[in-house]
Amino acid sequence: MTERSSFYHKLTYLAGIVVLAFPIVWLSVPATSGRAGGKLAQLRTNYKLAQFDLGKVDPASETIKFATLGLRGVAVNLLWEKANYYKKTEDWTNLTATLEQLAKLQPNFITFWKFQAWNLTYNVSVEFDDYHDRYYYVRRGIEFLQEGVTFNAGNPQLLWDMGWFIGQKIGRADEHVQYRRLFKNDTEFHPADRTPDDRDNWLVGKEWYLKAIDSVDNQGHSLGRKSPRDFYSSPAKSQMNYAEAIEDDGFFEKARRAWMKSAEEWRQFGNVFIEHSTGVRLQLGSQKRLEKEVADLRAKLESMAPGTRAKLVEEKRAALTPEERAILDLPKDKLTIEQSEKRYPLEPKVAVTDREVGERVAKEHPDQKNQALQLTSDIERQDRQLQFTISYKRDANYDYWQTRADFEQTANALEARKLMYDGRAAFRKADLPSAKKLYEDGFAKWRAVINEFPSIMDDEATTGSDLIDFIKRYRQVLDQLDEKIADDFPLWDVIEKFDKESDFTTEIKERKEKQGKPTGGPATPAPTPADNTAKPEPTLAEPAKPEPKPAKPTPATDNSAPKANEPTAEKKPAAADAPAAPSKPAPAPEKPAPPAPAEKK
């Protein structure tokens, strides 16, 4: 190669470098405050992929990542091992320091923040005897999760967990009385402009739930795998928990206003569109509207050819044997066990679907074929929507919580709870006659509440449990006075239905003996006047496809009990949130993580 040709090659290389510089600049120029940057920078901005779009940019965190020289994964594994070791050895100082280092290396790993916040709040806190120390680590876990929110701005999983931790851990722990007081007086945690009335843990938790909902509805973040039913119901349930908590504190007029707001927010939740797993969008408050629409469509289909459904039923019955038709003709409450077993498979055989009616109308009236088939499709679509709505309502105990919010704000319910509160205070002062009178007046009010809202007798987990607790306290007063529960006590039906722990077995037995009722099981039916020579056959309610019984109301927690790496309430709540149970449905971790250890008792 000559000297001249070498020079030409250098010129060619230089020209190539200059040419390639243009697309490189076009693609990769970084963005600044006054410049959009290259194509890649613009794409990062449009799709929010840049670090500053994810959340806070920490120079120390970025420096540590570079300092690992590509071995960040190895460093993370080593630090996780150290964290677990310090936890086992109860070295809380080094554990906290290790968690801080992990936070620098994994600022955008969502499961890390959830796991370690749970670890501090639920596991580390219980290792201390003084509730002040326990509260410190509860708050430390909450602050740790809040730090995760700053690095992952708008992440609905972390925002929702903030609401859960503040509401459930502080409001449901065994030390919830002390925790609520400490939290309300914790000026270091609360912003300076937050009033004392707004420092209640349930209201603060509700604020975080609303931020989580806003991040999904208005900022475009994904809900992930979390149940939308539990996600969107959390603010209203937190409001109910607040109403119950201040009621327990003796603020009854404030509680009335809180219950009114709870009822309004629960109805608003009923109007929220929730996506079913099949993709159908539901509104839990739309059941009555859907029932009317289905009934109107069916009536319109029936009017096209009156009697078609009945004709189809008779055709199906004609295909049965005389014995089978005889079993179907018997009243359900008169069936024997054997007859009930035989009837069960027969009912589907004579059931007529809307599709069958529509097809028969289309066949017999060709001029109305298109209209009949269209009506049939409309009925099936609306009925499917209705059945999904009923199922979701049952899982969310929607009707119960609506009734609860409605009856708790009534004058009778508020007066009943006030009398229970005053009765307990009188008992603590050893004023037994006053305590007895207050409790008895309160039970009369509770009777009025039950008469007005009989459906509350279907609930065992909250209302039933509350009433049994009140009756137990009343019996303590009677024991001191050497008296027993009177025969005209207005809530005997509550005792008999909700005494699951058999605390009132003796009283129930004595009362039945006075009334001449057997106490060892169900009574044998007496012979009927028409036939007093033979005992009637034993009967059994038909087992065929009964309407699914509503699940017992779960406390106002996520409803649904939290899934893996999600917190669960420490004690059985007495009121309305989360993880259905429970549901009662969980954020998808970014990468596998060990399950959160169960809280030590």
Image: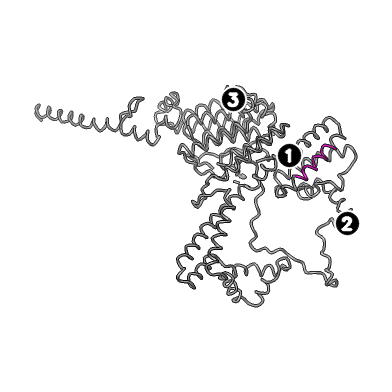
Identified by mark 3, the residue type is Arg
Residue visible at 83% across and 68% down in the picture: 527
Query: Which residues make up the magenta segment?
Result: 437-448
Q: Position of residue 252 (x, y in %)?
A: 72, 33
Q: Which residue is mark 2?
A: 516
Q: Which residue is mark 3?
A: 194
Asked if marks 3 and 1 touch (Cβ < 8 Å), the reply is: no
Q: Quadrant of the C terminus?
A: top right
Identified by mark 2, the residue type is Gly
Which tag is nearer the camera, tag 3 or tag 1? Answer: 1
Asked if marks 1 and 2 touch (Cβ < 8 Å), the reply is: no
Q: Which residue is mark 1?
A: 411
Which tag is nearer the camera, tag 1 or tag 2? Answer: 1
Q: Position of residue 225 (x, y in %)?
A: 51, 44
The residue lying toward the viewer, choosing from 594 and 109, is 109
The residue lying toward the viewer, choosing from 588 and 400, is 400
Does dot 1 land on a helix, a strand or a loop? helix
Residue 218 is one of the magenta-drawn residues? no
Does dot 3 land on a helix, a strand or a loop? loop
**From the viewer's perspective, is 517 left or right of 564?**
right
**From the viewer's perspective, is 589 left or right of 320?**
left
Q: Mark 3 or 1 closer to N-term?
A: 3
Q: Position of residue 70 (x, y in %)?
A: 40, 31
Mark 3 vs mark 1, CA separation in Å: 31 Å
How packed mark 1 is, by other alpha carbons closer than 10 Å (few <14, some 14-19, many 20 or more), is few
Q: Quadrant of residue 479?
A: top right
Q: Mark 3 or 2 closer to N-term?
A: 3
Identified by mark 1, the residue type is Ala
